[in-house]
Image (tube, helix red, strand yellow):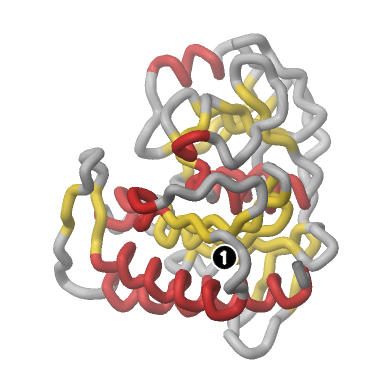
């Protein structure tokens, strides 16, 4: 894989998808449908998926591609592939809360090594550079001209005063019980893969997820966090979270800065 080309393509497609999403988001009303698993889907999900899929297939025709909106047709089993969630945080989108993201990632040998997370309603974009390190791009976010990039790095956490981030739409008692095992200075809520990025920038120290997720929900954020020095591990045994699993379903997991002393499940 040409990682320099991959970075440029993923960034451009994320921005283009973000424009398509925001055109629908800014409408007075839009239709919401239910998928077979009862999760919501909108025209924005579908438009972004079509745009990103076409772009990736044109640029990288020999690389396997998995996307959320086409997951039912995937018979693919691969260790190395591109994986896309065109609109992560559909509930945030529907409720007009702004915490939704475009996610594109490249998985190599079961590990997400490159990725982009773009929050179009918030104007924040995070991605990996060709060498795998992570940055946040600031400025106008022009599709043809890469703007100022700020290297991001996880915190050096104080285990007696941790900053925790958790889901807005999926927080439950099991999550609160686990968070209660830590000495917490403050807790914040965020939607979609932004939680990974808040750890990557040092704005939070730990994100436990005690609930269902799919690989396309996490791969891009995982790549960005890894590029900033962070970890994503299984909740049960604290081994690294891997990708290319049967059905693309994740176990419960914990994303964190490496200085966090993890508690048992």
Among the 4 quarters of the image, the one containing residue 236: top right
- Label 1 sits on residue: 124
The answer, for residue 201, to whether it is visible in the render is: no
**Number of callouts in the render?**
1
The answer, for residue 149, to whether it is visible in the render is: yes
Local packing at callout 1 (Cα closer than 10 Å; few below 14, some 14-19, many 20+) is some
Q: Is residue 129 left or right of residue 81?
A: right
Compared with 184, 67 (above or below) is below
Residue 98: give x, y in percent of width and height. Answer: 39, 58
Of residue 12 and residue 194, the one placed in the foreground of this image is: 12
Where is the N terminus found, in terms of image quarters?
bottom right
Among the 4 quarters of the image, the one containing residue 164: top right
Q: Residue at x 67, y 34 (%)?
A: 232
Q: Is residue 180 left or right of residue 241?
A: left
Of residue 212 and residue 180, the one placed in the foreground of this image is: 212
Q: Tell which residue pokes out farthest to the bottom in this image.
A: 144
Q: Residue at x 54, y 50 (%)?
A: 194
Residue 216: give x, y in percent of width and height. Answer: 50, 49
Of residue 113 and residue 129, the one placed in the foreground of this image is: 113
Q: Residue at x 65, y 57 (%)?
A: 106
Where is the C terminus found, in terms of image quarters?
top right
Helix, strand or loop for disc 1: strand
Of residue 203 and residue 4, the one placed in the foreground of this image is: 4
Among the 4 quarters of the image, the one containing residue 99: bottom left
Residue 31: give x, y in percent of width and height. Answer: 14, 63
Q: Residue at x 81, y 44 (%)?
A: 229
Q: Is residue 205 left or right of residue 129?
A: left
Compared with 249, 6 (above or below) is below
Residue 4: give x, y in percent of width and height. Answer: 78, 74
């Amino acid at each position: 894989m040409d990682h320099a080309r991959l970075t440029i393509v993923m960034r451009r497609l994320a921005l283009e998808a973000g424009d398509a999403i925001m055109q629908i988001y800014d409408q007075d009303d839009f239709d919401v449908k239910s998928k077979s698993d009862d999760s919501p889907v909108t025209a924005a999900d579908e438009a972004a998926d079509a745009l990103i899929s076409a772009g990736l297939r044109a640029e990288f025709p020999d690389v396997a591609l998995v996307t959320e909106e086409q997951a039912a047709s995937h018979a693919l089993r691969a260790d190395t592939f591109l994986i896309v969630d065109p609109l992560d945080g559909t509930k945030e989108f529907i409720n007009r809360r702004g915490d939704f993201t475009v996610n594109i990632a490249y998985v190599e040998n079961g590990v997400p090594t490159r990725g982009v997370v773009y929050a179009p309603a918030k104007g924040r974009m995070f991605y990996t550079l060709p060498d795998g390190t992570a940055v946040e791009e600031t400025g106008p976010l022009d599709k043809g001209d890469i703007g100022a990039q700020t290297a991001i790095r996880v915190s050096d956490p104080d285990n007696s005063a941790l900053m925790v981030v958790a889901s807005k739409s999926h927080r439950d008692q099991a999550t609160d019980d686990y968070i209660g095992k830590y000495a917490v200075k403050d807790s914040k809520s965020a939607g979609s893969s932004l939680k990974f990025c808040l750890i990557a920038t040092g704005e939070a120290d730990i994100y436990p997820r005690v609930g269902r997720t799919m690989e396309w929900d996490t791969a891009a954020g995982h790549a960005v966090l890894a590029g900033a020095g962070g970890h994503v591990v299984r909740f049960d045994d604290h081994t690294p979270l891997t990708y290319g699993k049967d059905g693309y379903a994740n176990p419960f997991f914990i994303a964190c800065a490496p200085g966090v002393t993890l508690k048992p499940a």
